[in-house]
Image (spheres, rainbow, N blue to C red):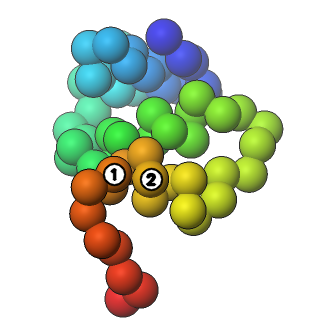
Amino acid sequence: MISFGPFTLVVNERLLLRQGVPVDLGERAFDILTTLAARPNEVVSKKDLLAHVWPDVTVEEG
């Protein structure tokens, strides 16, 4: 569980709460959020982000 501001991120339940109320978040958006939240105070490169969120997909600019 990761808390920031009014939000609580429950990774193992794939749940984002805002002041205890579930936030509707798409699957990819949740994956991006968990990737970034798992590495606080670090710069996550585009390459690392793409590898974690889209591991089996070729993603191009645009």
The answer to whether marks 1 and 2 mark residues whose Cβ atoms lie closer than 8 Å is: yes
Instruction: Count numbered badges in the picture.
Output: 2
Quick check: 5 above or below 43? above
Q: Is residue 39 left or right of residue 55?
A: right
Question: Going 56% across and 18% down the picture, which residue do you hit?
Answer: 3
Q: Is residue 54 left or right of residue 36?
A: left
Quick check: 10 above or below 53? above
Q: Quadrant of the C terminus?
A: bottom left
Quick check: 2 above or below 26? above
**Which residue is disc 1 drawn over?**
55
Question: Going 43% across and 22% down the picture, which residue do you hit?
Answer: 9
Residue 55 horizontal/vertical position (percent) = 33, 51
Q: For residue 46, what is the image quadrant?
A: bottom right
Circle 1: residue type:
Pro
Measured Cα–Cα span from mark 1 to mark 2: 5 Å
**Which residue is disc 2 drawn over?**
51
Question: Going 44% across and 53% down the picture, which residue do you hit?
Answer: 51
